[in-house]
Amino acid sequence: MRYVISLSLLLVVLWLAISGVYKPVLFVLGGASVILVVWLSVRMDVVGVEHNPVLFSWRLVAYWWWLFGQLVKSNLHVTRLVFQTSKVQPRLLTVPVPHEAAVAKVTYGNSVTLTPGTVTLKLTDDMLEVHALDEASARDLEGGDMARKISWLERREDNA
Amino acid sequence: MALFVDLLSWALLLSGGAFGIIGAIGMLRFPDFYTRLHASGITDTLCAVLIIFGLMLQSGPSLLTVKLLLILLFLLFTTPTATHALARAAVLDNVDPVLADNGKPGAEGRSSTGEPSSKS
């Protein structure tokens, strides 16, 4: 029930933010769509599973901030490679996925793809197949910084 | 103050545009399908982020800014999924990546623009 309420509140806020036109007719329509979505989510049995906003912690914000820094760094690196294509030395590598929760694994795979220079080719239960643009990008990933950050993110979710 | 915000916003917009062009150049210069995915990654991330930040400075504290933030959020969640879907499809289609160990690392980058990215 707690999750149903929090989901409804989130949807209401989202609707208010996106709409911007506040007339009675639209309020009714907005309310109706929120109820429809919540009803569907309950029917699909996805309320309170993994992606509920109540489960988000401040660590997620910290992680995003860190990821943003990585993003800028790897972008500049790939930009340099665009102008020096002779330095492009693609390679495949596999890195272990130390995380338990499915969300953490997906976060890992997505974060790897999001940073230019590395693209996730395949995500299995405990392994990540990655295509890296050059040696430096590959070594960055093999260093395991990102995996550690996500473990840190996951730990908080377990305690909650 | 308004001038300062305008200048900053234009700097963000222009550098975002520049990264978009760099991503496009990378798409043309990189040797094979997989390496090109990395180039498009620049357009997906830093280019989009800078342009949206620039636009947020233009719109000021309003509902528009919230919407721009939401666009950025959804963009950053969906583009890696799309990129991964492309890469996965290529793997399943047996598109072999050009690897450094195979000999010619990136040297043919400029000549191989016309190669089909799929063998089927």
Image: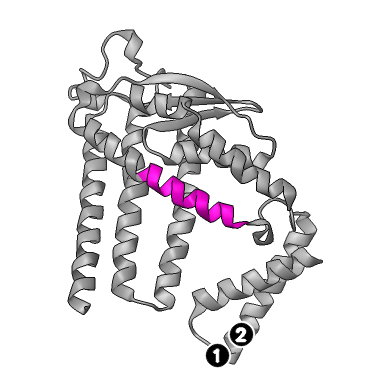
Q: Amino acid at mark 2?
A: Phe
Q: Amino acid at mark 1?
A: Lys
User: Is the residue under label 2 in contact with that under label 1 (CB below 8 Å)?
Assistant: yes
Q: What secondary structure is found at the residue carrying circle 2?
A: helix
State which chain disc 1 sits on: A
Span of residues in magenta: A57-71
In the depicted view, which residue is nearer to us: A49 or A157? Answer: A157
Can you identify the residue that label 2 sits on? A27
In the drawing, what numbered circle is on residue B119?
A: none
Q: Which residue is mark 1?
A: A23
Q: Nearer the viewer, residue A59 or A17?
A: A59
A39 vs B16, left or right, is right
Q: Is residue A102 above or below residue B112?
A: below
Q: Residues within 10 Å of mark 2 (few under 14, many from 20)?
A: some
| Horizontal and vertical percent position of residue B79 | 45, 46
Residue at horizontal 72%, vertical 73%?
A: A35
Picture quadrant where residue A53 is located: bottom right
